[in-house]
Amino acid sequence: MNSIQAANYFVHFNTNCYTNLHEHLESANYSKIFILVDEHTHAQCLPYFMGNLQTETPIEVIEILAGEIHKNIETCTGVWNVLSELNADRKSLIINVGGGVVTDLGGFVASTFKRGVSYINVPTTLLAMVDASVGGKTGVDLGTLKNQIGVINIPEMVLIDTSFLTTLPANEMRSGLAEMLKHGLIHDEAYWKKMIDLSNATTDDLDGLIYKSVEIKNNVVTEDPKEHGLRKILNFGHTLGHAIESYLLTHETKASLLHGEAIAVGMVLACYISNKQEGFPSEKLSEIKQVILDMYGKVEFNTSDYESIIDLMKYDKKNSHGNINFVLLKDIGSPVLDKIVDNKTIIDAFQFYNS
Ligand code: NAD
């Protein structure tokens, strides 16, 4: 698979990625390499990655606890302290081997330690391959509020080796599929059609679909790296999805959702709102709801849930001048930005999802 050129860096795939990594390590002459993992990727992914790594540069491994609840500034402080104790300097390299939590947090730690050291992302979940590792958004949550602290800062390179997916649990695979479905909905109806029937997909087919998703994300990010306009389309389903994810994280009596699972619900709601406000075709709305319910099952929401979730949306990073800005669709592949939606329509959307 050919490498994809992003803004000033490359995304390398499968067999190509280690050759490119070694060439880079030879030419960059780093003082030390720090590999950031979480407890699961330490056990499941690091041995394989180390087996493919050839370098004379000294290596240290830093482990963080797995899971979104640890994507916070306390974990960063722990990593900054270890870097400091192990004499990391400005010529150190951080390699993030993990899912979106490790790549988001590791990218942020690297971008801020001694005012910035280089980092490389090695995504090991589907979600991190097709979304989190590409585009340079780094950061952590503030309490349960998603991604409130962070910077946009690009990695040296991203290495996508899909063989990491062999150990990924099925629910984590589904979580990543949600971002791929999103790429179809915002950009390419033919891709959406391919994504909704994976029953006969081979490993090669999946590699091709991952490649296409990275291309879609990268094209958008390259055109608008700082999210002044177009890049906002990648937030389709995320305004309500993030609020749902945050809400369920704080309610112990309710089962929490993985990031992609919450985004999947958010996309059904956003399609309903798109149908009401932007004329998004009704038959496509029904199809999208059915596809997502078949893949993810249904989450039960009641009236008090809607109100708390709507309340949480005021923290969404796309808000401006007190308005909550939605990405909606006129049709599959035709997104529109900065749309204001009243609470009644959002409640109707939840009722449509529940019905
Ligand atoms: P994650 O990093 O928590 O990984 C999910 C789980 O899978 C973890 O328990 C992890 O240890 C485990 N795991 C990872 N790779 C594995 C493997 N190969 N085998 C077995 N287990 C493995 O979650 P995620 O879904 O990868 O990422 C979600 C995060 O990504 C969220 O915090 C979200 O905000 C962020 N995100 C960021 C961007 C961005 O542009 N920066 C985009 C989308 C999502």
Image (tube, grey):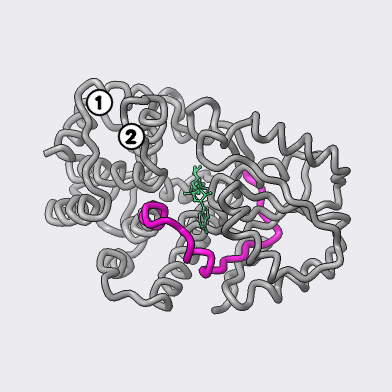
Q: Position of residue 204 (x, y in %)?
A: 42, 78
Circle 1 residues within 10 Å: few <14, some 14–19, many ≥20: few
Q: Position of residue 164 (x, y in %)?
A: 53, 64
Residue 75 figure quarter: top right
Confirm or reject: label 1 Cβ below 8 Å from ligand 1: no
Q: Is residue 226 left or right of residue 20?
A: left
Q: Is residue 268 magenta?
A: no
- Residue 255 badge: 2
Q: Residue 138, relative to residue 189: is it above or below?
A: above
Circle 2 residues within 10 Å: few <14, some 14–19, many ≥20: few
- Residue at image point 73% right, 68% down: 53
Residue type marked 1: Asn
- Residue 313 badge: none
Of 255 and 208, nearer the camera is 255
- Residue at image point 74% right, 51% down: 61
Of the 4 image quadrants, the one containing the C terminus is top left
Q: Is residue 168 left or right of residue 37?
A: left
Q: Position of residue 37 (x, y in %)?
A: 64, 50
- Residue at image point 21% right, 50% down: 293
Q: Disc 2 vs disc 1: which is toward the camera?
A: 2
Of 348 and 278, nearer the camera is 348
Residue type marked 2: Ala
Q: Is residue 20 visible?
A: yes
In magenta, the rendered stretch is 152-176
User: Judging from the image, what secondary structure is the residue with disc 2 in?
Assistant: loop
Q: Earlier in the sequence, mark 2 or mark 1?
A: 2
User: Judging from the image, what secondary structure is the residue with disc 1 in?
Assistant: helix
Residue 85 figure quarter: top right
- Residue 343 badge: 1
